Structure formats: structure tokens, C-alpha cells
Amino acid sequence: MKYRDHRGSLSDSMQTEIEVNTINDIIEHLNVFYKDFNEEVEEIVFEHVGFDGRINWDTYYVLQRLKSEKHFTVAGMNNDRIGETK
């Protein structure tokens, strides 16, 4: 399935698109960024947004919770829900 990072514009976000197979693929991708901040993703959940006709994706928010945080934030979007949690 496809995953893209959350960015300011759709075109910026689409430039980060990668193919993933599992939740762990997304976590590994995000942890590359967070490594420089001594941080890690603890948990991933998905929230269905709807169909985006601009890119033909049935879009899900990919919400992340970092180990040091209590709340989820948007990490990116994907075109298929992989599962409920990591």
C-alpha cells in the first residue's frame, strides 16, 4: 500500500510517497526522522478520512504516538488501513 508523510501541501506530501507492507514499515520510516531527536514511535493508529479524488486514494490518517507523549499526532496518510494498532 502507499504511505506519505504529512506536509504543508498535497504536492509536498506526495513527494514523500513510499510503498509499505506493514505497520512496522511505517514505524521504521518515521523513526529514521526521530532518531536525531532521541525519540521513537510507540504506537500507530488509523482514522478513515474518505476518498480523495485528487489522487484516487481511499485515505486514512496515520496517527502516531511517540514514547514521550500521551497524545497522537498526524504522521501522514495511507491508502489502506493496515490494522488498528501496532
Image: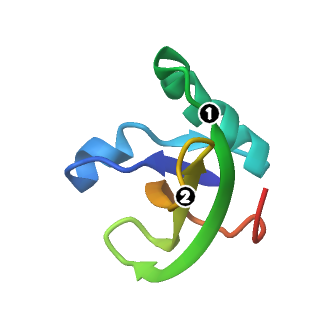
Say whether residue 54 is left or right of residue 8: right
Residue 18 quadrant: top right
Using the image, tell me which numbered label, if any, was put on residue 40: 1
Where is residue 79 shown, x and y percent of the image? 57, 65
Residue that extends furthest to the bottom in the rendered view of this protein: 50
Which label lies toward us, 1 or 2?
2
Where is residue 57 shown, x and y percent of the image? 49, 70
Say whether residue 70 is left or right of residue 44: left
Q: Amino acid at mark 2?
A: Lys
Figure quadrant of the N terminus: bottom right
The residue lying at 56 percent from left, 76 percent from top is 47
| Residue bearing mark 2 | 70
Residue that extends furthest to the top in the rendered view of this protein: 36
Q: Earlier in the sequence, mark 1 or mark 2?
A: 1
Mark 2 Cα shell of 10 Å, populated few (<14), some (14-19), many (≥20): few
The residue lying at 45 percent from left, 71 percent from top is 56
Q: How is the image coloured?
A: rainbow
Residue 67 quadrant: top right
Q: CA distance from mark 1 to mark 2?
A: 13 Å
